[in-house]
Image (spheres, helix red, strand yellow):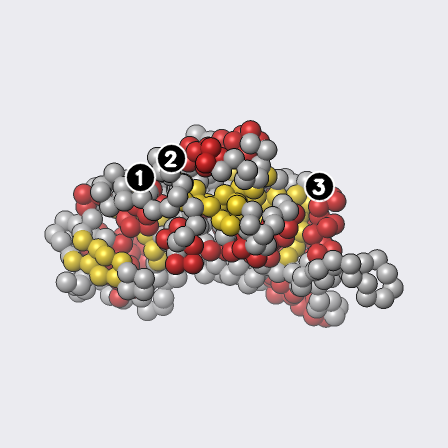
Amino acid sequence: MAFVLNGNVKPFEKKIYLSSPTMHGEELTYMSEAFHTNWMSTVGANINEVERIVAEKIGCGYAVALSAGTAALHLCMKLAGIKKGDRVFCSDVTFAATVNPIMYEGGIPVFIDTEYDTWNMDPVALEKAFELYPDVKVVVMANLYGVPGKLDEISEICKKHGALLIEDAAESMGATYKGRQTGTFGDFGVVSFNGNKIITGSSGGMLLTDDIAVANKVRKWSTQSRERASWYQHEEVGYNYRMSNVVAGVVRGQLPYLEEHIAQKKAIYERYKKGFEGLPLTMNPFDAENSVPNYWLSCAIIDKDAMCRQVRGENESCYISESGKSCPDEILEAIAKYNAEGRPIWKPMHMQPIYRMHGFVTREGDGRGRTNAYIAGEGVDVGMDIFNRGLCLPSDNKMTAEEQDRIIEIIRACFN
């Protein structure tokens, strides 16, 4: 039984996106400067400036501009010394780009379950994982949807066990934990400038470090590991990972607007929170005492007893509408009919076909793989529970308050 359109609410004439780029004009100025000065490759003033500005804004020693956040993560894995067969602990609820670079180096991801407080890596499960796999020396942790995880606890656990921490802050640029910018809590950090991020270059990313030797090593690796010789001398494998001066021009024009974008995203989050009052769903949580998110994506999770029946397969899903209840697929289908874009929560990595045989550690599990506890109603597999009941809402900062009010009305109608 599908959602029925309400005649009082018309579809949006112009699509409301999940999170599209917001351009200001300065981007074109810096891109044109690269064009007119003929610095179109992977050197130039734009690259130098974005590295300086980002390091200053985030509060790290050095920021190395690369072609993508994924490229930055890959070089983090190389810096961490991951070898074939090494196990690496990794966030479970995240985009695949957090995990895939482990595989590039031959590592074996072991997934750490999520906790409800922030939807990020559970420190209790991480400690449990070290009991099960005491030889692990690298942890990769992502700050989901712009919300900082429990970074102090995770950092301390890593130090206790002599493990390096790689902080994937691709989604959380500008967010802070205890007054400190995300991306600076790990031994290495990463931010992304992908097209839908809070600051975009259309593509691009950065590796963050306080070590000049590390920064120089990454710059060398990212430019095919060319040695200091007048000819092309290569003594180790390199990559074509450096950011172009044109992309850097877009990022350079965007960076002055970071705080403005965060304020706009926060207003969207707060309007949803107020608009959903009285409904059996809540916004994605954060630790208000210690952290300030960048509110990149506003998300919601439906109360367990307000979920209509929903089943998801590998590529398809179905649901049955019930009075007073709803589910993510019904809501996403409803807003899509009105020309607005949402999406499901990231499907946990331990449930992805490519990673299903990898270890998965919950705070109560044995680390060997699946648990039937969620199916039995115990809620042990937190990541799958959030995936099953949660969804990402339209969070484009060009969406007007009136447009958002209409989206809220559509969602409220799903529970009627």
Closer to the camera: disc 1 or disc 3? Answer: 1
Placement of 24 over or under 299, stated as above or below: below
Classed neighbour count for the residue bearing mark 1: other residues with Cα under 10 Å, few (<14), some (14–19), many (≥20): many
Kindly identify which residue carries mark 3: 211
Image coordinates of residue 31 in percent, x first then y, are 65, 65
Tell me where residue 60 sits by quadrant. top right
Along the polypeptide, which appears first: circle 1 or circle 3?
3
What residue appears at the point 71 percent right and 41 percent down from the top-left corner?
A: 211
Kindly identify which residue carries mark 1: 380
Image coordinates of residue 177 in percent, x first then y, are 51, 35
Image coordinates of residue 50 in percent, x first then y, are 66, 53
User: Quick check: 323 left or right of 406?
Assistant: left
Between 290 and 261, the residue placed more toward the observer is: 290
- The three-letter code of the residue at mark 1 reads Val
Along the polypeptide, which appears first: circle 1 or circle 2?
2
Between 359 and 213, the residue placed more toward the observer is: 359
Q: Which secondary structure, mark 1?
A: loop
What residue appears at the point 55 percent right and 29 percent down from the top-left corner?
A: 160
What residue appears at the point 58 percent right and 52 percent down from the top-left corner?
A: 84
Closer to the camera: disc 3 or disc 2? Answer: 2
Numbered tag placed on residue 363 in the rendering: 2
- The three-letter code of the residue at mark 2 reads Arg
Classed neighbour count for the residue bearing mark 2: other residues with Cα under 10 Å, few (<14), some (14–19), many (≥20): many
Q: Which secondary structure, mark 2?
A: loop
Classed neighbour count for the residue bearing mark 3: other residues with Cα under 10 Å, few (<14), some (14–19), many (≥20): some
User: Quick check: 20 left or right of 32?
Assistant: left
Measure the C-alpha gap from mark 3 to mark 2. Answer: 34 Å
- The three-letter code of the residue at mark 3 reads Asp
